[in-house]
Image: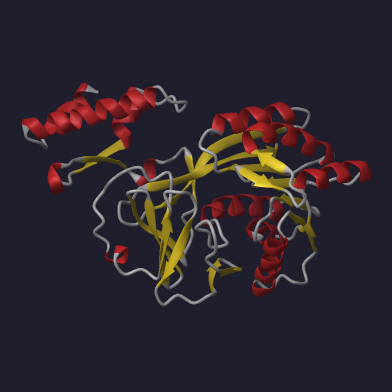
Amino acid sequence: MQKFYRNVKSLFSQPDFMTVRFQIEFLNFSCYNSSTGLSENAFSDMFLLLIYKNKQKIYIIKKKEDYNSMWIADQWKDYEVIDCSKGEKLERWGQYTLIRPDPQVIWDTPKTERGWKHMNGHYHRSKKGGGEWEFFSLPEQWQIHYKELTFNLKPFSFKHTGLFPEQATNWDWFSEKIRNAGRPIKVLNLFAYTGGATLASAAAGASVTHVDASKGMVAWAKENAASSGLSDRPIRWLVDDCVKFVEREIRRGNHYDAIIMDPPSYGRGPKGEIWKIEDSIHSFIKLCTKILSDDPLFFLVNSYTTGLAPAVLTYMLSTELAPWNGTVESQEIGLPVTESGLILPCGASGRWEAK
């Protein structure tokens, strides 16, 4: 670390160097006390100093290529995070730009991108909770594409657009597994929303059961399937409470080769059933193992709850899927930020896969 400091010191005046050293020490302490287990050499090699003399601030920025412990959705052409600052992210969805709140964006960096002042839609969060959209020349609905998939976008309540683009890194992962399985694969997609994972699974050749408690979301997923040319694929569309559906599948003796679940942090079922992820996720994973086939291919769990760290997902999956011969890995998932070259964290995923 001392050699690293000497190299850094040559770039700065003494006052600036002390500011840089303080930030390095702070980040170093944070890394040492996290679950990443970074060594001192790994830490010093991992950081690049970019000097922003704007407003007397110096930022230490991690290089994009050094995020080797994250799964990054970096194959998009129709979507990008242009910039993010002060609790918001500036995004391009096809030819339209949106500004939406993001609780992960706790930093205050200069908003120099012109899109911050020339957007097509801006979701304003209310201090009382919720919020509302403000639109500028934005159609009610438009499409974007990810590889062979097509998604219909419609901004609606709670800042949403109908798609979580960071999930593309998981779509790519399990699509390859389905294509290379060499056998028919039955996938169960729970809390399936507008069908991103359903479409990716079907396009890769799987038969899919799509379950979501919202009738509107299931209808939207069907629209996405039609737009993607997948209407004739073996997809079963169900409006149902996910827990109750799995319980019935156990009684019916049905089994699946792969399970995907993308549960909300908090939600209610069709009959008012309460779902709180911290209280429910472990028991639900355990329940779902009862409908796994004798030769499962993969099991994927997503979480947007900051308290549900990757290590927690690994522990639960390793414990409950121990009877099957497989491996578990969990990581943060993220999206590249064009302006800074950094990665915006977007939750975590836990992956079990057969050996």
Of residue 107 and residue 181, the one placed in the foreground of this image is: 107
Look at the image and tell me in which quarter the N terminus lies.
Answer: top left
Q: Is residue 271 visible?
A: yes
Q: Is residue 337 above or below residue 303?
A: below
Q: Is residue 184 left or right of residue 264?
A: right
Q: Is residue 155 above or below residue 57?
A: below
Of residue 237 and residue 136, the one placed in the foreground of this image is: 136
| Farthest-out residue, left | 13
Percent x, y for residue 49? 22, 40
> Quadrant of the rendered structure where residue 119 is?
bottom left
Q: Is residue 66 left or right of residue 52?
A: right
Q: Is residue 111 left or right of residue 303?
A: left
Q: Is residue 67 above or below residue 225?
A: above
Q: Residue at x 55, y 68 (%)?
A: 153
Percent x, y for residue 142? 53, 74
Percent x, y for residue 143? 54, 73
Q: Is residue 312 left or right of residue 216?
A: left
Look at the image and tell me in which quarter the C terminus lies.
Answer: top right
Percent x, y for residue 102? 43, 49
> Quadrant of the rendered structure where residue 338 is?
bottom left
Of residue 179 and residue 222, the one placed in the foreground of this image is: 222
Q: Residue at x 65, y 69 (%)?
A: 224
| Farthest-out residue, front | 128
Q: Is residue 331 above or below residue 135?
A: above
